[in-house]
Amino acid sequence: MPRGRTSIDIQRIGAYVTIAVALVITLFPVYWIAANSFKYDIDIFSIPPQWLPSNPTLKHYHAAFIERPFLIYALNSLIIAASTTLVSVVFGSMAGYALARFQYPGRWRYQISFWILSTRMMPPIVTIIPLYIAFNYLGMLNTKPAVIIAYTAFNLPFATWMMKSYFQDLPVELEEAAMVDGDTRWGAFLHVALPLARPGLAATAIFCLIISWNEFLLALVLTLTERSQTLPIGIAGRVTQYSTYWGEISAAGFTACIPIMIFAFIVQKHLVRGISFGAVKG
Amino acid sequence: MTSVTFQGVVKKFGEFIAVNDLNLEVRDKEFLVLLGPSGCGKTTTMRMVAGLEEVSAGDIFIGGDRVNDVLPKYRDVAMVFQSYALYPHFSVADNIGYPLKIRKVPEEKRRQMVMEVARRVELDRLLDRLPKELSGGQRQRVALARAIIRTPKVFLMDEPLSNLDAKLRVQMRAELKHLQHELQVTTIYVTHDQIEAMTLAHRVAVMSRGVIEQLGTPKEIYNNPRTLFVAGFIGSPPMNLIDGEVSDGAFTSAGGIKIGGLGHSNVADAVLGVRPEDAHLLPGGSGKANVTAPIYSVELTGESTLVTVRAGDSLFTLRADKSFVGDFDQMVNVSFAPERVFLFDRKSQNRVDF
Ligand SMILES: Nc1ncnc2c1ncn2[C@@H]1O[C@H](COP(=O)(O)OP(=O)(O)O)[C@@H](O)[C@H]1O
Ligand SMILES: [Mg+2]
């Protein structure tokens, strides 16, 4: 069947071309930042563009990480994003499990999960002034815990909802079997439900990490000191009244991509679904 | 001494009553089978014993202790789920050993016991596999092994054989029966397959729409069905149920089936029940026939021949000798063993004794 064969080939080529175009579109900015971070200022704007630095330099990395406090910003970002992710995933999975498995009495049954999500329905900017006043009152402005608390407040509802839907997809009978086998509800959650929800945990963790790593608005308002600021704020600070330091922005920006990429790379193998095959007969 | 007692147990899902006023005592070391069609409340009943479902009313006792408010882990029952419910992320060995691990049995002892049980159900070569790498029959045996690795007060088995192929099912049936005899543990076994019920049970409880229709030994259930439902549900092929009328102990159906000697009963909406093996073909033009009718079909099953005749609008099956040869539409004379026919009242659905 030569004709059928050809149409399959065309389909496959079509798929590859589409993927290639998507990759170029998404990866070009990353490549361009990476390339610029190693160029001298004059080469960044050269026309025709320099696709690869003709005269590579680490000058901007030196400027950002040695002369300016980008190392501190990076560390702050790391602590804040990791803490937010940890807290959101831990409490999100517990809350999600409860919502997936327990029936709440009366009208609470339908409303409680909606309420949780509804906290995300207003734009974050609306909450900024109240948050600023609250943290100011508590003397927590310019501290990492303040940022972590604020980020967690925004990530937890999503984490809860994501984990809830993962737990709902697991067959209840596995946890019931564990309880009949002698486990408590908590044990069934820890030994059975949680390991099986690993793809959900991975997805939720990546999601929370990316959101809090890249967050700008809340951090901008809640932190003013170098010691408490995060990478996005630090990078934005290199756009000054007099000049925009594209080299330093590129160097810090490219460096900021790396931890997320590493994390995503480590976690992606857990994202694969299908571990629950074989749980129930079929 | 572990009996399981249900006293007026009711289970409602919202307005829907899944189990209605269940009263039943499962005796110590008994193999009791809950038999009934899909959706009649068997699984729900079993889940209430395991503590996975709260009772809406009534009490459940395990070994004399009221367990209504006892958590599953303290009830000391072992359950084989209809879906097996194997832990997909554990190996076969870890699946089987899980109840021991929870009870903090030391690793060495645990491994030894897992090995012992695995050998018994012939899984000892598969201990490192994951559930998804097993066949249906092997998964079933893992579920069984996980239940028998400890000696619980009660075994609960929810249609454990229903997803096996026919041959394996027959083999596992015998194994289960033997195992229960050996372990001497009170067992509640759920099935919708009446042959499984008949072959396994000490006593069968036939359920329909949330109530127990009849409780008795397989023999009693088969030979002495108390309701129309039980009569029609037990037996393969099932009992012939023929609508008609009884006046002064004589039954007449629209299709011309007549039988006398049913005492002096009078029932307007009567149902006559005759098992296929209690109806016989009469040779030649005998006048003793209860009905003379044409053959509808002839099926040789091996050990016997099933002959279906058409009497008026209704079909009627009898079990003839395997040597029987007959043709479509050939007229035959059929007689019923008079002491083996049953009479039911369509309205009340109950047996009419005569
Ligand atoms: N969690 C539930 N919510 C609502 N209805 C249920 C639930 N579980 C079972 N039922 C209903 O109760 C009836 C009995 O179910 P079940 O005990 O599973 O039947 P069986 O095991 O005899 O096939 C069915 O009609 C079923 O739809
Ligand atoms: Mg069932």
Image: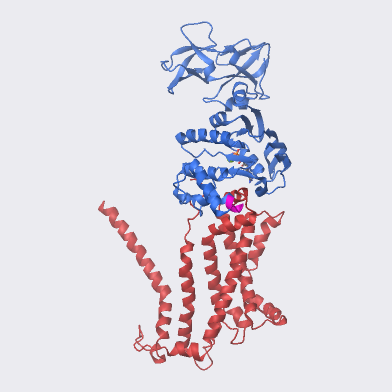
Chain colours: A red, B blue
Nearest the eye: A48 or B15: B15
Q: Is residue B236 above or below residue A33?
A: above
Q: How many marks?
A: 0
Task: Locate residue B75 relative to residue A201 in the image: left or right.
Answer: right
Q: Residue at x 62, y 21 (%)?
A: B224
| A75 or A57, nearer to the observer | A75
In this view, the residue farthest toward the bottom is: A242
Residue B86 in view, yes or no: no
The front one of B35 and B199 is: B199
Residue in front for this viewpoint, A133 or B24? B24
Residue A63 placement (x, y as % from top left): 47, 90
Q: Quadrant holding ligand 1?
A: top right
The picture places residue B290, in percent across and down from the top left corner, at 55, 11
Q: Is residue A238 a member of the stretch shown in magenta?
A: no
Residue A93 drawn above or below residue B237: below
Q: Which residues are magenta?
A: B100-105
Residue A17 seen in the figure: yes
User: Given the current orientation, which residue lies at the most extreme left position?
Assistant: A2
Q: Residue at x 48, y 85 (%)?
A: A249
- Residue A76 placement: quadrant: bottom right
- Residue B65: x %, y % from top left: 73, 41
Residue B343 percent coordinates (x, y): 63, 18
Asked if residue A194 is positioned above or below residue A31 in the image, the reply reads: above
Would you say residue B103 sits in the magenta stretch?
yes
Judge whether B349 appears above or below B11 on screen. Answer: above
